[in-house]
Image: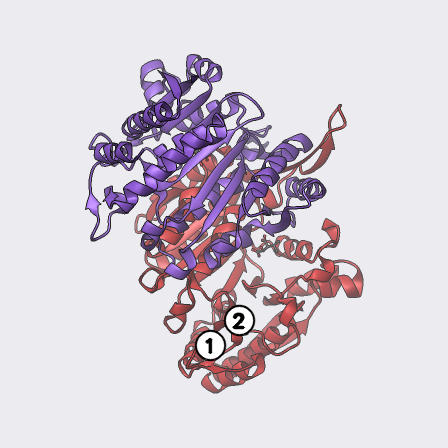
Chain colours: A purple, B red
Amino acid sequence: KRSYSITLLPGDGIGPEVISVAKDVLVLAGSVEGITFEFREMLLGGAALDATGVPMPDETLSVSKQSDAVLLGAIGGYKWDNNEKHLKPETGLLQIRSGLQVFANLRPATVFPQLVDASTLKREVAEGVDLMVVRELTGGIYFGKPRGFRTDENGEEAGFNTEIYSQHEIDRIARLAFETARKRRGKLCSVDKANVLEASMLWRKIVTELAQEYPDVELSHMYVDNAAMQLIRYPKQFDTILTNNIFGDILSDEASMITGSIGMLPSASIGASGPGLFEPIHGSAPDIAGQDKANPFATVLSAAMLLKYGLGEERAAERIEKAVLDTLNRGFRTADIYSAGTKLVGCKQIGEEILKSV
Amino acid sequence: KRSYSITLLPGDGIGPEVISVAKDVLVLAGSVEGITFEFREMLLGGAALDATGVPMPDETLSVSKQSDAVLLGAIGGYKWDNNEKHLKPETGLLQIRSGLQVFANLRPATVFPQLVDASTLKREVAEGVDLMVVRELTGGIYFGKPRGFRTDENGEEAGFNTEIYSQHEIDRIARLAFETARKRRGKLCSVDKANVLEASMLWRKIVTELAQEYPDVELSHMYVDNAAMQLIRYPKQFDTILTNNIFGDILSDEASMITGSIGMLPSASIGASGPGLFEPIHGSAPDIAGQDKANPFATVLSAAMLLKYGLGEERAAERIEKAVLDTLNRGFRTADIYSAGTKLVGCKQIGEEILKSV
Ligand SMILES: CC(C)[C@H](C(=O)O)[C@@H](O)C(=O)O
Ligand SMILES: CC(C)[C@H](C(=O)O)[C@@H](O)C(=O)O
């Protein structure tokens, strides 16, 4: 019997509710496939700030590192919005990404046929969209130094950050993107701003060179401003998109919105070795927290990504994905994806329905 | 009789064709309103590279500076795509922006009722969108230093850029954005990444402080990843958007695409004093250059912005805007905005039809 240790980071807002559902689904899907889990729940984000004074306690990182995979709910809330940077929930998220060295963030944007009308894009444009954004996650302007504030001789203040990428940082994320494209439809579009930024010029050079090792993958390059347009104009042109940390932050959110169902989308953050970090792409939705209104599908699908990308348990992952589709087909919806003719239920009941379908 | 000197920078690809139309329209609308123009045509971009070896000859800048306003067609083309940075057409564009110190780029994204079905967004989402992006244009990561490449002790290369904003740079663009919002519907949304970047934290602080001087303007803040989503989810929530150079590059292109008619959208780049730079937001479209297929509406509307923002000639500007709407109402279309039931004509004929309507 295969056994894995999983760190759960429920976080803030609706985080605990969706994590609770995903945990039950993991346990059941695992048991059917002969897998057992040992869970440890740790603090991150606002929950950690309130309990310990820091957004990512050392213990959270060390327990996470020792486990086989980490499943995160969501972090943040109005309460901590005006905190200083080192006391923001978001800082805890950046710290755990960096601490686990999960340099690759995989963010699928898939239009579920059952939910295509939720997109603000016309049906014929949204239908069939199935793309994957591979975002660099532990480098670039998010972490680059020097950064901070300075005052010049006239007393004028400035704020500054450094966008920087080294060869090995580009190489490892690009390889992972080529591998990802190879397992999908074999098309990779690398997005940069190489007509202006030196960091992007090196990016483009290294990605172009690597392409020789992946002759079966069709590589193209696109400027980030054009990519922001093309995602709206004709999203089906994309299979796998490779980009840096900040452009990936923007484009992956844009791509998720074209699907019309942010509450459905998971993500995986993985490194060269060590546990991966899996989380829904939606936020902590403090306004509906504790009301059993949250949509747990994205977290359940993140648990599926955990099985597939984190543990190599493809069969259990597929079992969960099928259960999600089955639950949608049976008409169950939370408020955010509800439409006339479907059944509006709460977070817990969605969980129970998924369990029935596992 | 009022008289102005205008520098024309036709540039590359379809640039000369659309500039020629816009010039004729300027002359006629001006003459009706008692304005005369003196034009000088100068080189920029690929055209300048081929003729002089640099993308922005000194003479282009000095003549532009001495004129009352600058009207640009488009720059760039496959031919120069692999040039080194200092020999790229785009570098010429950055140099003239910087040389003219036009720190504010105003980019309206307006859905023309006649063209609403060209948007890939659903009619009810796209209809009535009328927003203005105020993008900082001469600072931030586009121009920040240090920038370049470096090799560490192990021989590993890195590319880097600096995102930097000082108080006065933020102050002047924010004031202009507040003034712009005041003349529109009184709503300003400042877009940044203040949960991660120090440059954005200072940005948010200064914009927030300035709001006290504009009590009639309703200010909000939004993270750039969320803004990329909200533009698709519900674009009508926006009136005026204020943002930095790189975020503005991405978001203004995204915003233009939601209108579905990039060939219709103008832009104005203005500074504290001196001539402004006016240009369509579309590119040089080398594939259709010289075939009388280009859509000149955006350049004609840029000429209207030139009159309004550059010369303070509101009446002549409105005359041109009305002529454009009238030409659309009479059913004339270039290929990029053609739909069944309208009249497909070339660039020159669109020009003639606009002249009839002036
Ligand atoms: C919360 C924030 C720091 C984070 C990011 O910018 O990476 C979020 O937007 C994301 O994409 O996961
Ligand atoms: C051509 C390029 C340098 C330019 C920019 O990035 O500013 C363009 O995309 C624009 O928005 O005018």
SS state under label 2? helix
The kind of residue tagged 2 is: Ala
User: In the picture shown, does residue A66 fall above or below B282?
Assistant: above
Residue B292 placement, left or right of B110? right
- From the top left corner, tell me how far across and down residue B139 is, in percent: 57, 45
Q: Residues within 10 Å of mark 2 (few under 14, many from 20)?
A: many
Residue labelled 1 has its Cβ within 8 Å of some atom of ligand 2: no
Please state which amino acid type lies under the numbered disc 1.
Ile
Residue highlighted by disc 1: B320
- Residue at the image point whose x is 64% and y is 57% from the top: B93
Residue positioned 67% across, 38% down in the render:
B147
Q: Nearer the viewer, residue B219 or A231?
A: A231
Q: Which residue is mark 2?
A: B303
Q: Quadrant of the C terminus of chain A?
A: top left
Tell whether label 1 touches label 2 (CB within 8 Å): yes
Q: Earlier in the sequence, mark 2 or mark 1?
A: 2
